[in-house]
Each structure stands twice: as structure tokens, then as C-alpha cells.
Image: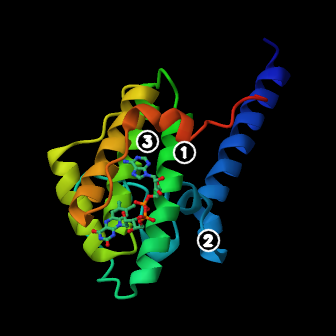
Amino acid sequence: MKKSHLTIAVLGCFLLFSGTFWIFYFRPAQGTPLSHLLTNNNDKGLTWQDQDVSQSGGVIMNHMGNATAKAELGRSTWKLFHTMMSRYPEQPSDDERVALAQFIHLLSRLYPCGECAEHFQTLLQKFPPQTSSRIAASQWACAIHNKVNERLGKPIFDCSDIEAKYPCGCELE
Ligand SMILES: Cc1cc2nc3c(=O)[nH]c(=O)nc-3n(C[C@H](O)[C@H](O)[C@H](O)COP(=O)(O)OP(=O)(O)OC[C@H]3O[C@@H](n4cnc5c(N)ncnc54)[C@H](O)[C@@H]3O)c2cc1C
């Protein structure tokens, strides 16, 4: 390699590294550091690691006094819940299975009716979510809804009708 080419290469490397260094270390003094934005969530200063969802943790909301609001919330949530299961992959990846399990556990913490959430958490401990396939997940969801029905004195749903009741809406896909 010619000496002039070597000089250009060394200069190029220097500019590249010094530019990167400037972006990640000097820029913070003028505002939000880029490195901080990439690795942290600014919401209440939590890092992504802090927000790693775990399978533990208690119920967050209080008792819901308004019975009408509680029933409406329940109907809407069950609709979402069963429709989600009807579109869940037939053969989910590990990542998809973890996503569903985490969603259900977080729902049990954040469900807006606190006493419902308490009971739901107890049910989940006894009957952990089944995530291995669409059928497993939708049948599990039907069974867990029936457990809630049982407790509230409501009719038990026939889970063999679950696909007809919550169609996947996938005809045109
Ligand atoms: C996680 C969770 C926990 C709850 N805990 C409580 C609680 O502790 N106390 C309380 O008062 N309320 C609770 N609720 C609300 C309660 O389950 C009902 O949603 C609410 O009382 C309204 O009842 P509903 O008779 O309209 O029918 P819902 O139970 O809301 O059901 C809506 C429709 O779903 C269908 N369905 C019924 N059973 C099943 C099933 N097993 N699988 C699939 N579809 C079915 C029926 O067509 C029914 O009309 C909870 C709701 C949720 C989502």
C-alpha cells in the first residue's frame, strides 16, 4: 500500500472513531445523550432491564365499586381475550409463547377491577396459561372464564363451541 493511501486510511479511521466518540460522550452535555435514549426508557427513569416483565407481582388497582362498569369491563375483556386466542398461532414460537404468558400475567396485575384481578391471580396459580398452540390457548381461556362464571353463579359455556363463538376473522387473509 502506498504511503499516501495509508495516511488517508488512518485519517478516515480517526474521523470515524472521533465522530462516534463525540456522539456518545460529548453530546450529553448539550441534551439527552443518544446512548441513554437507546438503552433507557425515559419514563420515570426506568431502564429496559428494570421493565423486564416477570411472572410475579401483585394486583395494582383497587376495588371497583360500580357493578355496571365492572360487568361492561368484563364483557369487553373477555371478548378481547377469546378473540386473541382465536388468532394466536397454531404453532407458536418460543417468543410468541412467552409473549402470551406475560400478557396474561400482566393482565392479572393491571386488570382495572382489583378484586377480580386478585381472584384471577389465584386462578392462574392453580391453572397456569397454556400457550403451546391455538387450540390449547383457546381451550384454556374458555376453561378459566368458566371458573370465573362458576364463582359468579353464571352459566357454564360449552368450550367445544369456542371457535364458532369467536371466529378468527381470517377468511380474507
Ligand atoms: C379476568 C376477569 C376476572 C373477572 N372477575 C370478576 C370477579 O371476580 N367478580 C365480578 O363481579 N366480575 C368479574 N369479572 C367480570 C365477569 O366475568 C363478567 O364479565 C361480567 O359479570 C359480565 O357478565 P356477562 O354475564 O355479561 O358475561 P361474561 O362472563 O362477560 O361473558 C360474555 C359472553 O362470553 C360468552 N362466554 C361465557 N362464558 C364463556 C367461556 N367460558 N368461554 C368463552 N365465552 C364465554 C357468553 O356468550 C357471554 O355472554 C371478571 C372478568 C375478567 C375478564
Residue drawn 61% across and 36% down?
168
Between residue 133 and residue 9, name the one nearer to us.
133
Lateral position of residue 126 relative to residue 36, left or right:
left
Q: Is residue 138 something one can see in this rendering?
A: yes
Quadrant of the snapshot with the N terminus: top right
**Precedes in sequence: disc 1 or disc 2:** 2
Residue assigned mark 3 = 99
Residue drawn 84% across and 24% down?
4
Alpha carbon distance from label 1 to label 2: 41 Å
Do the CB atoms of the residues marked 3 and 2 lie less than 8 Å apart? Answer: no
Q: Which mark is residue 127?
A: none
Q: Label 1, secondary structure: give it.
A: helix
Residue drawn 59% across and 66% down?
33
Q: Could you say where residue 17 lies in the image, as x and y percent from the top left?
A: 65, 43
Q: Label 2, secondary structure: give it.
A: loop
Alpha carbon distance from label 3 to label 1: 16 Å
How crowded is the residue under tag 1: few (<14 C-alpha within 10 Å), some, or many (20+)? Answer: some
Q: Which amino acid does label 3 sit on?
A: Ala
How crowded is the residue under tag 2: few (<14 C-alpha within 10 Å), some, or many (20+)? Answer: few
Q: Which mark is residue 32?
A: 2
Q: Could you say where residue 165 lies in the image, as x and y percent from the top left?
A: 54, 42
Q: Could you say where residue 12 lies in the image, as x and y percent from the top left?
A: 77, 35
Q: Could you say where residue 38 lies in the image, as x and y percent from the top left?
A: 57, 55
Rendered position, 131 above or below 71: above
Rendered position, 125 above or below 85: below
What is the residue that sits farthest to the top in this orientation?
Answer: 1
**Precedes in sequence: disc 3 or disc 2:** 2
Q: Label 3, secondary structure: give it.
A: helix
Residue assigned mark 1 = 83
